[in-house]
Image: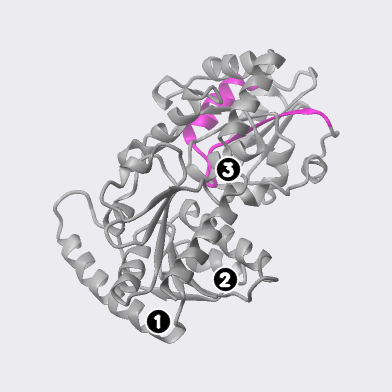
């Protein structure tokens, strides 16, 4: 089977596509798979995908601005040019099926595939669909959604199915022992992971600095605090000045490269509400304190977070209400109540779709067989 993957701009669109690629590779005993990833020249995928050893080609495309702008005229021209380039790449590669995982780059790719009669599937990670997927849903053969109950967001689509997010599958085999070892923490310890996304979050960093004097006091709880590379030096300096040094129970890091393993040993996580991260923590059954970013399209992170909150798997603190005391209280309420933590863990696990990648590859094979 020959597959074209497309998606980009952020890791939230790229990593689900990579997870599908890995699942296809794992299933190669049944059938050899050849993969091509078509991304943007300017997006993060141009760096990440080649690092994953997946063949990569690029088109030049930008997203629409949400207000009237001359740039939108240029975007339309790039889209049409991107459709033409995509058709040429698709005719050359001859895929059996094309999957788009969001971001404006997959717009011309999936649209071109549909016009060439190639079966297509798009995957929506968020509770509120993105602009590109709303557009593509009229052309795709299948729309796959990450949150149960959001199928109605695509009323005009040919077929909509609940698959979960394939990033959930990626973390299920991660080793908690390796996670503890990489952090230098004894196995079985209670780990509270605080992370504001790959680049960090200023609001979360500010709250952590405020609550830092009350954490890492030898009560058996280890706080693993990921500042984000841009904030690391200034944050560590401010913490040391405030505390006179870092306590043993507070681990301050700029970035975590082995996140699945660290998640596997985490008892409670404080983080944003990006869809891929939520897929990972529900697959592992990790209770969470979610602080949705207000700086995203359609406020979709709050919608994502409310899905978990409504099922008793998370506590939500809006950024406008975030303070050190508020965050510390939310953490202590969960960590200090083992019955509550276990209940939240079970609720999170119930929401997790651990076989998501396999569900998607099964649908891809169905689309190919239907075309044959």
Q: Which residues are magenta?
A: 188-213
Q: Is residue 218 visible?
A: yes
Q: Nearer the viewer, residue 20 or 183?
A: 20
On-image quarter of the N terminus: bottom right
Q: Which residue is mark 3?
A: 353
Mark 1 → mark 3, Cα distance in angstroms: 33 Å
Q: How busy is the neighbourhood of tag 2: few (under 14 within 10 Å), some, or many (20 plus)? A: few
Q: Is residue 178 left or right of residue 296?
A: right
Measured as percent of width and height from the top left, residue 329 is found at: 58, 14
Q: Is residue 284 left or right of residue 125?
A: right
Q: Which residue is mark 2?
A: 50
On-image quarter of the C terminus: bottom left
> Mark 1 or 2, which is nearer the eye?
1
Q: Is residue 213 visible?
A: no
Residue 212 in which image quadrant: top right
Q: Secondary structure at mark 2?
A: helix
> Mark 3 or 2, which is nearer the eye?
3
Residue 350 is one of the magenta-drawn residues: no
Q: How busy is the neighbourhood of tag 1: few (under 14 within 10 Å), some, or many (20 plus)? A: many
Which residue, as the protein is rendered here, is positioned at the far bottom? 92
Q: Which residue is mark 1?
A: 89
Mark 3 → mark 2, Cα distance in angstroms: 27 Å
Mark 1 touches mark 2? (CB < 8 Å): no
Q: Secondary structure at mark 3?
A: loop
Q: Residue at x 49, y 24 (%)?
A: 309
Q: Nearer the viewer, residue 64 or 300?
A: 300
Q: Secondary structure at mark 1?
A: helix
Q: Is residue 363 left or right of residue 212?
A: left
* Between discs 1 and 3, the one toward the N terminus: 1
Measured as percent of width and height from the top left, residue 107 is found at: 32, 64
């Amino acid at each position: 089977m020959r597959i074209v993957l497309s998606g980009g701009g952020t890791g939230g669109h790229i990593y689900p596509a990579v997870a599908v690629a890995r699942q296809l590779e794992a299933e190669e005993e049944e059938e050899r798979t050849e993969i091509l990833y078509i991304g943007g020249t300017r997006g993060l995928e141009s760096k990440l995908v080649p690092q994953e050893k997946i063949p990569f080609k690029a088109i030049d495309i930008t997203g629409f601005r949400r207000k009237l702008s001359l740039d939108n005229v240029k975007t339309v021209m790039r889209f049409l040019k991107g459709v033409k380039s995509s058709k040429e790449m698709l005719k050359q590669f001859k895929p059996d099926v094309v999957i788009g995982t969001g971001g404006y780059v997959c717009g011309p790719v999936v649209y071109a595939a549909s016009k060439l009669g190639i079966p297509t599937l798009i995957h929506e990670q968020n509770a509120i669909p993105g602009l590109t997927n709303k557009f593509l849903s009229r052309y795709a053969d299948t729309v796959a959604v990450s949150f149960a109950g959001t199928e109605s967001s695509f009323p005009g689509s040919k077929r909509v199915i609940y698959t979960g997010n394939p990033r959930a599958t990626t973390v299920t085999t991660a080793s908690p022992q390796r996670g503890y070892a990489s952090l230098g923490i004894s196995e079985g310890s209670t780990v509270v992971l605080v992370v504001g996304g790959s680049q960090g979050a200023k609001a979360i960093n500010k709250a952590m600095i405020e609550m830092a004097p009350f954490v890492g006091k030898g009560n058996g709880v280890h706080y693993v605090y990921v500042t984000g590379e841009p904030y690391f030096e200034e944050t560590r300096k401010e913490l040391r000045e405030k505390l006179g040094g870092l306590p043993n129970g507070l681990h301050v890091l700029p970035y975590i490269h082995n996140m699945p393993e660290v998640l596997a040993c985490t008892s409670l996580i404080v983080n944003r509400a990006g869809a891929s991260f939520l897929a990972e923590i529900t697959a592992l059954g990790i209770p969470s304190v979610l602080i949705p970013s207000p700086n995203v399209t359609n406020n979709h992170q709050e919608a994502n977070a409310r899905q978990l909150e409504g099922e008793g798997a998370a506590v939500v603190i809006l950024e406008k209400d975030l303070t050190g005391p508020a965050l510390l209280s939310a953490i202590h309420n969960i960590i200090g109540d083992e019955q509550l933590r276990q209940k939240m863990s079970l609720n999170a696990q119930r929401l997790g779709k651990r076989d998501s990648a396999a569900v998607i590859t099964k649908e891809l094979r169905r689309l190919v067989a239907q075309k044959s």
